Image: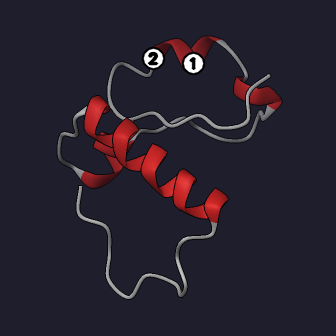
Amino acid sequence: MHGFALNVCGDLSPFDQIVPCGISNVAMTSMEKEAGRTFSVAKIATTVEALALERILDLRAAPATKPINI
């Protein structure tokens, strides 16, 4: 079990052979495929880690007013 998974980039064809997370009516995708551009896995991991820490520690007083640039 896992609590969070994020496909940043890469070959998603192995997902055609399984039912990911037991959800049969969805197709796996990635940030790269949806955005039409490449991302650094290391940069995404660092950004997600920082955002999660902010949420856990409740350091953000109000919702973000501008998008996060990655």
Q: Residue at x 52, y 76 (%)?
A: 60
Q: Is residue 43 above or below residue 50?
A: above
Residue situated in front as seen by the camera: 66 or 5: 66
Locate the N terminus by quadrant. Answer: top right
Pointer 2: what residue?
13
Q: Are marks 2 and 1 in contact (CB under 8 Å)?
A: yes
Q: Give the secondary structure at mark 2.
A: helix
What is the CA distance from the residue labelled 2 to the residue labelled 1?
A: 5 Å
Q: Residue at x 56, y 52 (%)?
A: 52
Q: Give the secondary structure at mark 1.
A: helix
Instruction: Please state if 67 lies on the left or on the right of 58 as rendered.
Output: left
Locate the C terminus by quadrant. Answer: bottom left
Q: Image quarter for residue 33?
A: top left
Residue 16's tag is 1
Q: Amino acid at mark 2?
A: Ser
Q: Image quarter for residue 10?
A: top left
Label 2 Cα crowd, 10 Å radius (few <14 / some 14-19 / many 20+): few
Q: Position of residue 43 (x, y in %)?
A: 26, 39
Q: Amino acid at mark 1?
A: Asp
Label 1 Cα crowd, 10 Å radius (few <14 / some 14-19 / many 20+): few
Q: Is residue 43 above or below residue 19?
A: below
Q: Position of residue 5 (x, y in %)?
A: 59, 34
Q: Residue at x 47, y 44 (%)?
A: 49
Residue situated in front as seen by the camera: 33 or 65: 65
Q: Residue at x 51, y 84 (%)?
A: 63
Residue situated in front as seen by the camera: 17 or 57: 57
